[in-house]
Amino acid sequence: MKYLLLGASALILTACNSASISPSKRSDPSSLAAPSHAYSQADYDYLAISDPEKMSAASKRALARNYHKNEEWFGEFRHETLFGDFAFDEDVSRRDPSKVLKINGVFYTWYTRTTGETKGFGTGDPDAKVFPWDHAEIWYATSKDGYHWQEKGRAVGPGQAGQFDDRSVFTPEILAHKGTYYLVYQAIKAPYLNRTKNTVAMAYSSSPEGPWRKLDAPILTASDTGEWAGTQDNHFLVKSQGDFDSHKVHDPTLLFYRNKFYLYYKGERMGERKTAGGREIRWGVAIADNPQGPYIKSDFNPITHSGHELCVWQYQDGIAIVSSHDGPEKQTIQFAPDGINFEIMAYLPTVPSAMGLVESLDKNAHPTAGLEWGLYHEYVIPAGKTWMSGGNQIKRFSFQSQYYKSSRNSDELTHNESN
Ligand code: AAL
């Protein structure tokens, strides 16, 4: 694996060097050729390149991006509905499930829970629910088999009027570290407008059942850069966009890695534009010596130029991610030997939304072992409704690797068929 990764960085350097040529040369595809000594005859053979002196742009790209490597990272997601309180309920929206922790033989997850109809912005009612995650609380549920779930109650709710989290708390993630449970989640202070900037908050407890003690202040805020244009509540109108996370800091995911606390998150930018991959969405990381912070944003942010809800796990000495719906590198698995510098390892046909991984899996068994199964959410949109006014449901995914056939997966399929 190390050899492959070193090989990948060498190829990327080669690609960078060729990208620094003058713009006039750039229009000539042959000027983008990587020096042939960077590749072996086996590389050319694998990619059906018969003459390395005459490579199309696509062949050069295939070499530079390792299209002939990393088969062990490839696979496909499958989806299953769940039972008990995670069966679809049109009156209750459950979404953005956290990691699944196994504690004394019982699975636990935390998630965003709301009721009531989403009305959207501009209704004239400052209390109207503007998004499916507005006026939300964080609840938790348990399961003995990972299929039948029982909702246990509220873990964390919004704060008192005037506090930074008085409007909504949602999209939780969990970290168990040295006997303490840390919940990280998004918080909104009223009023909830298009231009509202959210924060990331933390609560901790010595038990997964709570009680949870909130920190007094957010652990992460949107960057204080960028400038709105005018006073209309329109987040596309800006004088300057600012940093990648100048508007929103979303989907916090906390890992204990290399003896520090890595808080990965999604940033959204004021005046969001489109890229070749659609929405302008990127991820960053903020690092702390102690679980409660202070969290310092990495100078290398943004660390992705794609993705949506986070899916992050430690594999061997590095960090693996699944980049979901947005950006030119959507639907990829990526790996960073240092948790910062990610390279694409595989391109996936589909990716579930808001995946919560199972912490107790043996993630080092192989590259995608950490994805063996987990939870995610789906929109359920009845006729006449939209993604905003429809419902949300937590479901279960499994990942089918062609390379590593797992007997567990066939058990799951049998289980599914028998239900
Ligand atoms: C999700 C996540 C965050 C956003 C919202 C709820 O897809 O990215 O959690 O704030 O949508």
Image: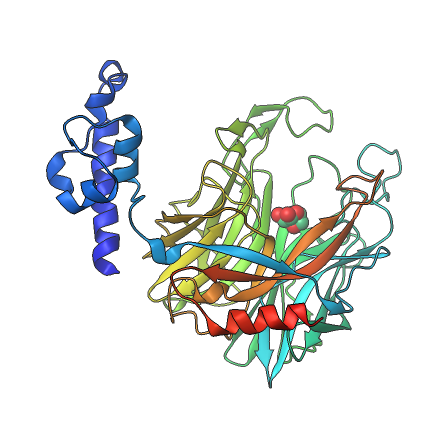
x, y percent for residue 254: 51, 62
Q: Residue 412: percent from the left, percent from the top? A: 58, 71
Q: From this viewpoint, which residue is outermost toward the right?
A: 125
Residue 151, above or below 15? below
**Number of marks drawn:** 0
Give the image quarter of residue 246. top right
The answer to whether residue 192 shows anywhere in this view is yes
Front residue (pair 55, 114)? 55
Q: Residue furthest top?
A: 24
- Tell me which residue sits at (25%, 21%) in the image: 29
Colouring of the image: rainbow
Q: Is residue 370 above or below residue 305?
A: below
Residue 219 makes an appearance in the image: no
Q: Is residue 53 above or below residue 116?
A: above
Give me the residue at 78% from left, 39% from top. Answer: 386
| Image quadrant containing the C terminus | bottom right
Residue at 60% x, 43% y is 248
Of residues 32 and 127, the one nearer the viewer is: 32
131 is higher (above) or lower (below) than 180: above
Residue 332 lies left or right of residue 274; in this view the side is: left
